[in-house]
Amino acid sequence: MHVTEMITWIYVSDLDRSRVLYEQGLGFKLLIDQGDCLLLSNSSGSYLGLCCRPPPRTTAGLLLCFIDQDVVGRTDRLIALGATLEQPTSHNPKYGITHAFLRDPDGHRIEVQSFDDPSWNSRD
């Protein structure tokens, strides 16, 4: 037996603000409202949980990576919704990606990335 799905849960200080960022900025939709926690999903089967709790003192080691062919456009949209730019869009030839790094309002690190190889996730 194998794992069938995965949810990434993060703690946020303002549930409404974070919901707007992840819904409007990344296209997630509300799946379940549990009051102090929200479960969001997107059309490709990714799940993101937001819980209104004090964020940890450090988010070192946590990286939320979102794949989008329009890295610049998605990064600009996230900045307009309250994320802060940490590293502007650049190409990384070692990994064959274009990416940018941001922080959400609670300090969670976000990477917006596109792969040079459009079949990066093929399972041939």
Image: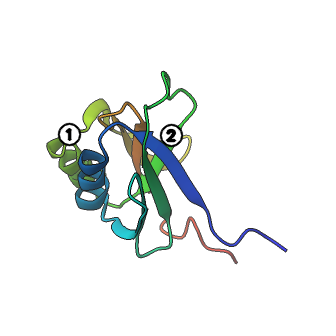
User: As drawn, is 22 to the left or to the right of 34?
Assistant: left
Q: Secondary structure at mark 1?
A: loop
- Name the amino acid type tagged 1: Gly
Q: Label 1 neighbourhood size at 10 Å, few (<14), some (14-19), many (20+)?
A: some
Residue sitting at 85 percent across and 74 percent down? 1
The residue pinned by badge 2 equals 63
* Image disc number at residue 16: none
Place residue 43 in its image quadrant.
bottom left
Nearest to the observer: residue 2 or residue 87: 2
Which residue does the numbered mark 1 point to in the structure image? 82
Q: Is residue 46 left or right of residue 75?
A: right
- Depth check: give the residue in front, 44 or 96: 44
In percent of the image, x 34 and y 65: which residue is there? 28
Q: Quadrant of the C terminus?
A: bottom right
Q: Quadrant of residue 108?
A: top left
- Residue at horizontal 38 percent and vertical 30 percent from the top: 107
